[in-house]
Image (cartoon, grey):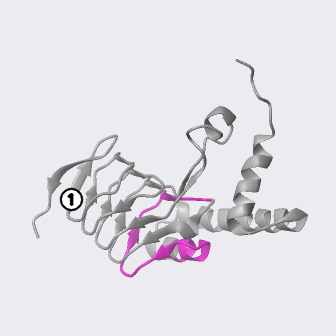
Amino acid sequence: MTDIVEDTSTLNENEIMEFYGYKGSCGHFILKLKFLRTWILHSLAYSCPSSGFAIKMQKARGVKIGKNCHISPYVMIDLVYPSLVKIENNVTIGSNALIFAHANPTANLFLKKGIYPRKVEQVTIKSGAVLFPGSIITAGVTIGENSIVGAGSVVFEDIPDYCVVMGNPARVIKKIEH
């Protein structure tokens, strides 16, 4: 099999520019400024012990966050598409949780141009949900109302309301009575 050598960084940047509606060299410059801004705001939120401050910084990045939420330190919310993450009211997110609104085999053109193209989809964490430390939420997932994602769990599919999920991949282990 012959390796295809192509400039993947340009291809990836063009995909992002298309998503945001930017074109040309001016668009490239605006995109770089946008990423610099979001990286600075993320950096301020990431290690801050104040949940209120972290939430303000994430909102400034474009993350939609409801009322009475708690975000622990060391939470990473998608750096490229923060506006695709929606966190409703009364949500708790534990330390070292990761929330991704995109997946992309960035440097592997075989996968990228084959059956695993860039995936960019909304993530919704419904009211009352709890993400325990180290949980990972992937692109296109909805976490149900008042559901709990166990520590270290990896969520690839939607989670129904009032459920406890654990594992990799996360599976429903219990329904919560309401």
Whether residue 171 sits left or right of residue 84 in the image: it is left
Question: Quadrant location of the N terminus?
Answer: top right
Question: Quadrant location of the C terminus?
Answer: bottom left
Q: In the rendering, at what x and y percent does residue 103 appear?
A: 55, 49
Q: In the rendering, at what x and y percent does residue 175 appear?
A: 14, 58
Q: In the rendering, at what x and y percent does residue 73 appear?
A: 46, 61
Q: Residue at x 76, y 47 (%)?
A: 11
Eyeballing the image, is 118 above or below 68?
A: above
Eyeballing the image, is 93 above or below 153?
A: below
Residue furthest bottom in the image: 67
Q: Is residue 62 magenta?
A: yes
Whether residue 27 sits left or right of residue 162 in the image: it is right
Q: Is residue 129 magenta?
A: no
Residue furthest top in the image: 1
Q: Amino acid at mark 1?
A: Cys
Q: In the rendering, at what x and y percent does residue 12 appear?
A: 72, 49
Whether residue 161 sits left or right of residue 109 in the image: it is left
Mark 1, residue position: 163
* Quarter of the view holding residue 45: bottom right
Tell me the magenta residue range: 56-79
Q: Is residue 136 visible?
A: yes
Q: Residue at x 56, y 41 (%)?
A: 116
Q: Residue at x 76, y 55 (%)?
A: 14
